[in-house]
Amino acid sequence: MKTLTKTAFLTAVLALASAPALAVQPVDPGSNGQHAGNTPSKPDTTPGPHASLPAKAKAYGRYCQGFSKKHVAGTPGTPFSRCVTAMAKLATNQSDSPRQSCRGLSKKHVSGAKGTPYSRCVVAGTKLLHDQNGS
């Protein structure tokens, strides 16, 4: 009698545990592994060039990581913020090329840095365009 009770209890527990797995919607063969009704949506939330610096830095800051965040006297903004603004202009199609969006950055060599701020911005802009076209 004890064996029959234990078997019935174990069967009930297993049935209750497997019920959620059986309730999942089937996967459509052409949906790339996504369940039916659960289509991922990626809204275009990239900030424009006139957005605040923290909003732009989250989106484009990874392309401008090598730029200094220290303010230079006599120039508006930091090199990092000007690079981020250039990336925002490039991403929102307000400029045609990385060269055009980065034209406000200095073309003078900085000791200890590889390339000029302008050339590093152009490289970052090219990477941004590559990432946008690749996805």
Image (spheres, grey):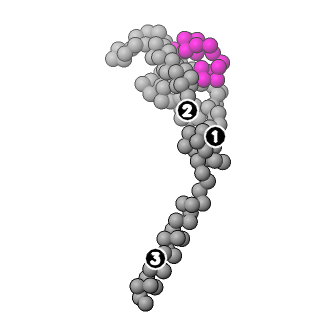
Question: Which one is closest to the eye, mark 3 or mark 2?
Answer: 3
Span shown in magenta: 89-105
Q: Which numbered circle lies on residue 10?
A: 3
**Who's the residue at 54% across and 35% down the image?**
58
Label 3: state its secondary structure. Answer: helix
Label 3: few (<14), some or many (≥20) within 10 Å?
few
Tell me how far mark 2 sits from mark 1, CA to CA. 18 Å
How far across and how far down the image is residue 82, in percent?
54, 22
**Who's the residue at 52% across and 70% down the image?**
15
How far across and how far down the image is residue 59, in percent?
55, 32
How far across and how far down the image is residue 96, in percent?
62, 13
Q: Which numbered circle lies on residue 59?
A: 2
How far across and how far down the image is residue 97, in percent?
58, 13
Q: Which numbered circle lies on residue 41?
A: 1
Tell me where residue 23 sits by quadrant: bottom right
Instruction: Assess whether mark 3 and mark 1 are in contact (beta carbons under 8 angstroms).
Output: no
Q: Residue furthest left?
A: 112
Label 2: state its secondary structure. Answer: helix
78 vs 66, left or right, is right
Label 2: few (<14), some or many (≥20) within 10 Å?
some
**Who's the residue at 55% across and 43% down the image?**
33
Tell me how far mark 1 sits from mark 3, CA to CA. 42 Å
Q: Decide: is 92 above or below 104.
A: below
Q: Quadrant of the C terminus?
A: top right
Amino acid type of the residue that numbered disc 3 sits on in the rendered structure: Leu
Is 37 included in the stretch rendered in magenta?
no
Tell me how far mark 3 sits from mark 2, CA to CA. 52 Å
